[in-house]
Image: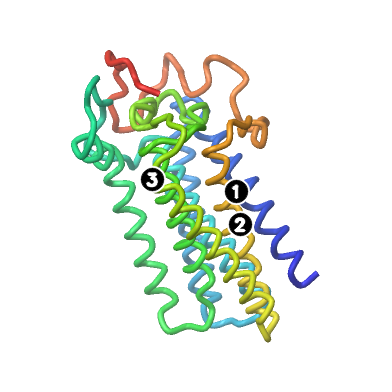
Amino acid sequence: MSYLLPMAFALFLWWFSTGLIFYLDQLPVRTFKWTMAGATAVLAAALYAIWASAGDQSAFAVYAAFTAGLLAWGWQEVSLYTGFVTGPRKHACGAGCSGWRHFGHAIAVNLWHEVAIVVVAVVILSLTWDSPNQWGLWVYLLLWAMHLSARLNVFLGVRNVSEEFVPPHMAVLKSFLTRKPMNLLFPFSITAATAGTLLLFQQALAAETMADRTGYSLLAALAGLAVLEHWLLMLPLPVEKLWRWSLPHRPGAAKSHKSVPPRIDYTALNTKLTP
């Protein structure tokens, strides 16, 4: 139970929080200001929890720091897919755009989002500096690594791009999704993720204290999910069934004739988006 309970907790928290973000990002645009206000309040609470638990080496404090780190990462996802923190580029690439130029456009679309990730990482690092409980930092960094690897693989080309998870108001992102049987990065990504997962499981099994056993078990479960997510990019499976409850069942989701998009001009794209 000392291993299974943390793993089950990590799996449930990842599944539920991911589905909740999908649900919120598919709501009418007029709700986004409230979503961002709530997410920012949660971020502030998560940072406080990371700071408050930094000196505590109990198993409960490990759970608290882990949950707070995951919630801090959730703010990044919400801010991107609601369109509040994206990048200076607001339009899709035209036909024929490829190579490093296309990669530069992809960075420009997400630039402020990536900067925000670094800023929050530095804040968490400063809050836990030289403290025994740094599990909030580790989970945040692990989620960042998962995010970066998945984004690069989707950009380079995978079988299952899961474009149904991209909300309509962020359709510009679809021009940077590439469908291919394989890309050269994927074997390295899946190998590194698998090796990292095995090492974390090994650390959990070798841990001498309940706090370390709990922390490594939580991270190992999350790393195992990273391996699963990478394989799902290459397998033509109906991934959306995992979060069917969170996806919209009405054509007007993420759209409203009375809604005003937050700080971004979501003018309808004239360029046909390449899947």
The alpha-carbon separation of the residues under discs 1 and 2 comes to 6 Å
Residue located at (23% from left, 31% from top): 98
Q: Secondary structure at mark 3?
A: loop
Decide: marks 3, 1 in contact (CB < 8 A)?
no
The alpha-carbon separation of the residues under discs 3 and 1 comes to 18 Å
Q: Secondary structure at mark 1?
A: helix
Which corner quadrant of the image does residue 204 belong to?
bottom right
The foreground one among 229 and 41 is: 229
Q: Secondary structure at mark 2?
A: helix
Considering only order in the chain, which callout, 2 or 3, is on the residue closer to the N terminus? Answer: 3
Decide: marks 1, 2 in contact (CB < 8 A)?
yes
Furthest residue toward left:
101
Residue 255, percent from left and from top? 46, 19
Considering only order in the chain, which callout, 1 or 3, is on the residue closer to the N terminus? Answer: 3
Q: Tell me the number on the disc at residue 228.
A: 1
Q: Is residue 245 above or below residue 139?
A: above
The alpha-carbon separation of the residues under discs 3 and 2 comes to 22 Å
Q: Tell me the number on the disc at residue 209.
A: none
Residue 176, percent from left and from top? 34, 32
Q: Which residue is mark 3?
A: 184
Residue 96, percent from left and from top? 22, 22
Residue 122, percent from left and from top? 34, 67
Mark 1, residues whose alpha carbon is within 10 Å: few (<14), some, or many (≥20)?
some
Q: Quadrant of the C terminus?
A: top left
Residue located at (57% from left, 71% from top): 199
Residue type highlighted by circle 3: Leu
Residue type highlighted by circle 1: Leu
